[in-house]
Image (tube, helix red, strand yellow):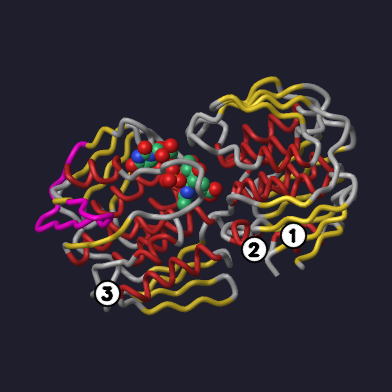
Amino acid sequence: MNRIAICGGKKLSGEVRCQGSKNAALPILAATVLNPNECELTNCPDLADVSSALKIITHLGGKTEYSKYTATVNAADIHRFEIGEELMASMRSSVLFLGPMLSRLKQAVISYPGGCSIGLRPIDLHIKAFRQLGVSVEEIGGKIYCKAEKIVPARINLIFPSVGATENIMLLAALSEGETVVLNAAREPEICDLQNFLNAMGAKISGAGTETIRILGVEKLKKVKYNIMSDRIFAATCLCAVASCGGDTVLRNVNPDHISLILSMLAGAGCSISCGHDYVRIKSSERLRGLGKIMTSPYPGFPTDAQALFMSALSAADGTTVFVENIFESRYKHVPELIKMGADIIVDGRLAAVTGCNYIQGASVEAQDLRGGAALVIAGLSAIGDTIISGVSHIDRGYEHIEDTFAQLGASIKRI
Ligand code: EPZ
């Protein structure tokens, strides 16, 4: 059952509830390792990456439970400080357990993290920051050996606002002495959610959402129940699907402020958008218009995770859109698959020029990564004819039963 079959051309109308955020849940799950008391996480999405994170916590000695979108973690008995290759390779966020392990156990041995093959994805910024915080780090034979007798406060100036590096520094410094300051920090909403979770446990962190984050170390953390934010990229995925297929859909449990740029761009492409504090309504009836140029950049700029989604939605638009992918060096693996469906796309390095064709047609295509796979679902939904998508395990890492989401909006889609 690792394929999805779609009979395209149906309009998408109705209501969909936005899932909990994968990219907030994963650092928050890593953060539970800091706390010897129980953490209950609600609105925790039912995803392959979430189960990978729970497996890592169990491997380290923690107790975990997951049911009905609630994860419960008790990390009192954390004692293992090594994560093997298989667990590390399961996702990029495995690297976020480094900070909590060092904080609790003063040592850690990991191999390099996995995740979507959208670039080299080094962790040099994590390691450089950790060395400033007093961690000794040695990379020998594909493993990373870390020891931290004493974490010292530091003033860390990131050369790039890395999401993961910002999160790992917050996790390591939360229980250390003194005040650590992160300059040029990532500003994504998921960083704010992590700060809110850590502070709900008793940490003293401020500045998330700005380029300067201050972490004043505390001595202990308390039991907590926390509701994870909604997934803004899941929201973007649904909105791009309705935009390209046509229809009238309300997305519930979404924060419009997190996707304001995406909403204004969809309006610019010809959609009608209306919002409340926790919902977005999108109506699309005409052929979309090309958007000229889309450049990905760190939040609050255009999110790299929405690049493939917009490329798919605009493949049959009236006009041209040139994408500039500034975050990851090889995030166009979905392009050859979209070309199989009739899209007219030329890639040159970080640029991809999309000339809207009259329509795209169904084909057999293969997902190469998470968001590229979601883009192929969007293309299949709007294509004329049948599409078969293989490699669906990539998509399942970040979407809860994506076929159910679109079937409830009237799409002819099923897992086969
Ligand atoms: C997070 O990845 C997200 N993943 C990604 O979402 C997202 O695309 C990315 O942030 C950017 O917004 C999770 O939160 C689990 P980065 P992360 O560190 O932390 C380079 C999805 O589809 N870099 O901000 O890995 C890196 O190579 C995923 O949900 C270094 O050079 O992103 C990349 O070019 C895909 N050295 C750029 O920075 C480092 O030490 C951005 O990486 C770290 C990063």
Q: Quadrant of the N terminus?
A: bottom right
Name the one closer to the observer, 138 or 81: 138
Tell me, yes or no, whether the highlighted magenta stretch contains residue 142.
yes
Identify the residue shown where x is 86% and y is 51%.
Answer: 13
Identify the residue shown where x is 63% and y is 46%.
Answer: 372
**Label 3, label 1: how many angstroms apart (C-alpha)?**
37 Å
Residue on which disc 2 sits: 400
Marker disc for residue 405: 1
What are the residue bounds of the magenta stretch? 138-155
**Label 2, label 1: how many angstroms apart (C-alpha)?**
8 Å
Mark 3 vs ligand 1: CB under 8 Å?
no
Callouts 2 and 1 close, C-beta under 8 Å: yes
| Amino acid residing under circle 3 | Ile
394 versus 32 height, above or below: above
76 versus 270 height, above or below: below
Q: Earlier in the sequence, mark 2 or mark 3?
A: 3
Residue on which disc 3 sits: 78
Determine the quadrant in which ligand 1 lies. Answer: top left
Is 286 on the left or on the right of 104, as rendered?
Answer: right
- Is any part of residue 207 visible from this angle? no
Is 104 on the left or on the right of 314, as rendered?
Answer: left
Q: Earlier in the sequence, mark 3 or mark 1?
A: 3
| Amino acid residing under circle 2 | Glu
**Label 2, label 3: how many angstroms apart (C-alpha)?**
29 Å
Mark 1 vs ligand 1: CB under 8 Å?
no
Image coords of residue 138 (percent x, y)? 17, 51
| Amino acid residing under circle 1 | Thr
Q: Earlier in the sequence, mark 2 or mark 1?
A: 2
Identify the residue shown where x is 80% and y is 64%.
Answer: 414
